[in-house]
Image: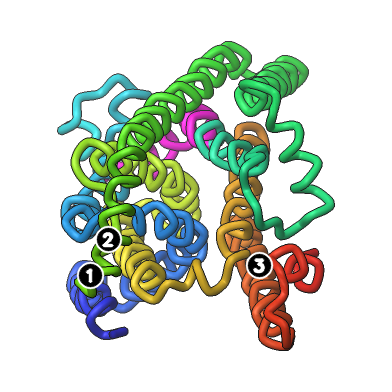
Amino acid sequence: MVLKTFGWSFAVTVLGLVAAVIYGGWQAFGIVAILSVLEISLSFDNAVINAGILKKMNAFWQKIFLTIGILIAVFGMRLVFPVVIVAVSAQLGPIEAIDLSFNDPDKYKELVTDAHPSIAAFGGMFLIMIFLDFIFDEERDIHWLRWIERPLAKLGKVDMLSVCVALIVLLISALTFATHAHQHGGGHADKASTVMLSGIAGLITYLIVGGLSGFFENKLEEEEEREHEAEEEAKKKGKPVTGVALAGKAAFFLFLYLEVLDASFSFDGVIGAFAITNEIVLMALGLGIGAMYVRSLTVYLVREGTLDDYVYLEHGAHYAIGALSVILLITIQYEINELITGSVGVILIALSFWSSVRRNRALAAESGGGSEDKSEVSAGV
């Protein structure tokens, strides 16, 4: 099962490391290996969130996610995206930007760094909306950090609360950025408006893609109910039963949502990679290998039913998303070490996994089976 799921990742790892040695010797080998580990550690929470969405899709769309999706993730976000950043920010043509990345990597890094506030604002707002919609979800039955989640879930009854909170956070970030630049006599005060626009663009992107996904999911509810009734009838007649998975337009927009989500998660990895190397080839190899493992891990979580067995994993991943969104918004003005960025997510997911194990043990120890609420009391925080 492991080889079947991670086989392509292993193959890409070998090819990528061999290509690194051919391109730049053993030093390049080391850089690519470090970048791969960096991408995996920064995107582990991405895999957990992806798995929660991917399990709703049918087999066809899961394959699309692993084929076309990986091409978008590896070549689009890890190779083309940095070039696009430079082309737009420096008002260069794509060919000129690629030429710059090979012949003047220091200037290339400078241009990408200059565009970082806009990237961070866009990605930060997209990710914070994911976290806020999760934390304000009043219909969620299972709570991990009950003392936080239950009161906030009650606040979720207020319409558009997550949007209001996100806009307030964006406004504070932009004003802080402008104030700091003004006090230090920098030339970035005029970029406060760019930060605002980028953040609003991230918010709009989330609302459009997430809204369309939700719309088509809701449209299929009646069909799923009919399928459920058909399943019950099939059980009575002793016929085999197949589960309902999203297809068609619903799955397509969920796929788009997954790709935008992956793009937002990759921002910190792409920017963080410049702290290790300025060479676009090594960056693409290292981050591409990492992205393959994230994809394989996503499929593994879906096929093994891990999210069903360890119910707090999704909670930990969403808290990691919230932390990453805050970190991205802070990096608009201040530099944060990539080790901190990666370790925060890993620690939160590890804690949620540990809580899930405790919950499962508590359930197993209950002679009468117990209720879901009892399991929360015994295992929740």
Counting from the top left corner in percent of width and height, residue 182 is at: 72, 15
Image side of residue 280 versus residue 191, left or right: left
Quarter of the figure with residue 187: top right
Label 1: which residue?
237
Q: What is the crowding at mark 1: few (fewer than 14 residues within 10 Å), some, or many (at least 20)?
A: few
SS at circle 1? helix
Residue beneath the point at 62% across and 43% down: 139
Amino acid carrying label 3: it is Ser
Label 2: which residue?
233
Residue beneath the point at 36% across and 59% down: 55
- The residue mark sitting in front, 1 or 3, is 1
Q: Earlier in the sequence, mark 1 or mark 3?
A: 1
Counting from the top left corner in percent of width and height, residue 275 is at: 50, 54
Q: Earlier in the sequence, mark 2 or mark 3?
A: 2
Counting from the top left corner in percent of width and height, residue 129 is at: 56, 34
Whether residue 152 is visible to the viewer of this picture, yes or no, is yes
Image side of residue 340 versus residue 83, left or right: right
Counting from the top left corner in percent of width and height, residue 260 is at: 36, 39
Quarter of the figure with residue 52: bottom left
Task: Give how far apart the Cα atoms at labels 1 and 2 are.
Answer: 6 Å
Q: Which residues are magenta?
A: 101-123
